[in-house]
């Protein structure tokens, strides 16, 4: 039987306005974040940076992102206005992009990477919290699918736009464009009509803000929840398997495809984003109707299958085709991570702290993945590296099957959440 959907709390403006603004916020945030990917390496290379220096700069951003996940999540939890948290994150991203464009020197670049790393840790959980505030828990799963769709479209559009700007204007212009894209993102936050918090104390227990008796460090016991620890371990192994697959495949494609390598790699990036855009709303609906556990397992199974295909496929065209499975895993992870976090922290006001903990697991897994797979590929070849990543993906499936219960709330109607103002 289809579960009843909980209505969100009343808005002071038309609901459609806030939801459309949320679409655009996800789109433009994905747009501007694209500039902090491979474009940094290209930009710094044009300024005579060595590969070693570029690697150190990128590592600073990765390290800050990992270390800041939990404190940034706690900070967003402590802020009653999640829209303000998103605004601060966007302004910090704009500042880091401008800093990169103005001073491509070691000190400013390191600072920009650190600021961007922390800003990203604030921005992503803030958007998830705004989403939960705006639609309520009953519609959260389906709305996360829509968020993921617009983010995937934004990623693809951002990569294409910045690639054209970098090729025909300059690599510096990519970062001015990234800074400029924060303006429509800020306007999207501004366009969300504020909500009227409910005075009902029974509804206040479901708010994203910690209850009055659970301020400060109270409520941090959620980090010891066995379900959260199991889920974080699943995500760690998922990222351990996933993060290095495309870089290793890209190196293999470069050896095989020659002059066509850039086109093949571009296709490898676009195909999974298209799959995420198409599949994510369905993932959200199925997680709400059939439960989180079955959808999580199906998404996780796609990863070791993809690893086995990459270990045995030689044709660049088949490698591109295998990226469909990357899109399947990406759609499931993009929807299920915030959804399960919301389930596990229901009534605690520690949603973003939970998101930060899972984000830390993502960072650790991704870092270990590139180090492990790169070493194996260099010594034993790419097939051995892919098989090792496949094994890690299989471990993620086994941990999920053994430790993750169904976290979907009971089918009984849930009272609407009473969110703090989000704009």
Image: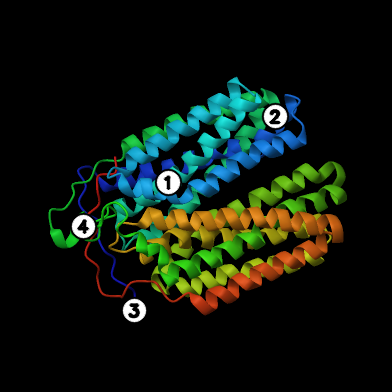
* Residue depicted at 23% across the width and 56% down the height: 211
Q: How crowded is mark 1: few (under 14 residues within 10 Å), some or many (20 or more)?
A: many
Residue marked by disc 4: 213
Instruction: Please tell me in which quadrant of the rendered image residue 378 appears.
Output: bottom right
Q: In which quarter of the image is residue 187?
A: top left
Query: From the viewer's perspective, is residue 160 above or below residue 210?
Result: above
Dot placed on the residue nearer the N-terminal end, 4 or 3: 3
Asked whether 189 or 46 is in front, the reply is 46
Q: Is residue 396 above or below residue 270?
A: below
Asked if disc 1 and disc 3 are in contact, CB closer than 8 Å, the reply is no
Which label is found at residue 1?
A: 3
Where disc 2 sits, the SS reads: helix
The earlier-in-sequence mark between 1 and 3 is: 3
Which comes before the other along the chain, label 2 or label 4?
A: 2
How far apart marks 2 and 1 lie (CA) works out to 28 Å
Q: Kindly identify the residue that appears in the image at 36 percent across and 40 percent down.
A: 85
Query: Quick one: label 4, few (<14), some, or many (20+) residues within 10 Å?
Result: few
* N-term mark: 4 or 1: 1
Q: Are marks 4 and 3 in contact (CB under 8 Å)?
A: no
Q: Name the residue under label 2.
A: 44
At a point 51% along the width and 69% down the height, the residue shown is 296
Query: Mark 3 packing: few (<14 Cα in 10 Å), some, or many (20+)?
Result: few
Which quarter of the figure is the N terminus placed in? bottom left
Quadrant occupied by the C terminus? top left
Image side of residue 108 versus residue 140, left or right: right
What residue is disc 1 on?
A: 72
- Taking the spot 54% from the left edge, 43% from the top edge, the residue there is 64
Q: Is residue 32 visible?
A: no
Circle 4 SS class: helix
Q: Identify the mark at residue 239; answer none if there is no mark.
A: none
The answer to whether residue 323 is left or right of residue 328 is right
């Amino acid at each position: 039987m289809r579960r009843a959907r909980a209505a969100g709390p009343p808005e002071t403006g038309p609901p459609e306005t806030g939801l459309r603004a949320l679409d655009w916020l996800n789109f433009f945030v994905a747009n501007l974040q694209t500039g902090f990917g491979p474009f940094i390496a290209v930009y710094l290379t044009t300024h005579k940076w060595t590969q070693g220096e570029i690697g150190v700069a990128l590592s600073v951003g990765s390290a800050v992102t990992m270390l800041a996940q939990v404190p940034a999540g706690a900070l967003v939890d402590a802020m009653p206005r999640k829209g303000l948290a998103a605004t601060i994150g966007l302004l910090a991203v704009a500042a880091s992009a401008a800093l990169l464009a103005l001073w491509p020197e070691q000190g400013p670049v390191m600072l920009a990477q650190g600021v961007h790393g922390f800003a990203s840790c604030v921005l992503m959980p803030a958007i998830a919290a705004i989403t939960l505030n705006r639609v309520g828990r009953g519609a959260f799963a389906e709305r996360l699918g829509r968020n993921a769709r617009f983010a995937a479209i934004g990623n693809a559009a951002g990569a294409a736009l910045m690639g054209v700007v970098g090729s025909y204007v300059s690599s510096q212009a990519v970062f001015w464009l990234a800074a400029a894209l924060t303006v429509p993102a800020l306007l999207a936050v501004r366009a969300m009509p504020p909500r009227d918090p409910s005075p009902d104390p029974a509804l206040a227990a479901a708010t994203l803000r910690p209850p009055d008796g659970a301020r400060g460090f109270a409520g941090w016991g959620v980090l010891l929840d066995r379900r959260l620890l199991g889920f974080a371990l699943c995500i760690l192994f998922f990222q351990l398997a996933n993060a290095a697959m495309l870089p290793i495949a890209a190196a293999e494609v470069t050896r095989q495809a020659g002059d066509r390598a850039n086109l093949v790699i571009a296709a490898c990036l676009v195909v999974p984003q298209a799959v995420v855009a198409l599949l994510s709303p369905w993932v959200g609906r199925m997680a709400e109707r059939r439960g989180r556990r079955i959808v999580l397992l199906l998404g996780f199974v796609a990863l070791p299958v993809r690893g086995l295909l990459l270990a045995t496929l030689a044709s660049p065209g088949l490698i591109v085709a295998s990226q469909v499975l990357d899109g399947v895993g990406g759609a499931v992870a993009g929807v299920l991570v915030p959804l399960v976090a919301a389930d596990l922290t229901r009534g605690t006001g520690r949603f973003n702290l939970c998101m930060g903990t899972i984000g830390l697991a993502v960072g650790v897994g991704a870092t270990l993945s590139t180090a492990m797979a790169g070493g194996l590929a260099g010594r034993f070849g790419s097939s051995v590296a892919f098989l090792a990543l496949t094994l890690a993906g299989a471990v993620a499936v086994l941990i999920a099957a053994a430790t993750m219960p169904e976290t979907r709330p009971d089918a009984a109607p849930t009272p609407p959440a009473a969110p703090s103002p989000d704009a």
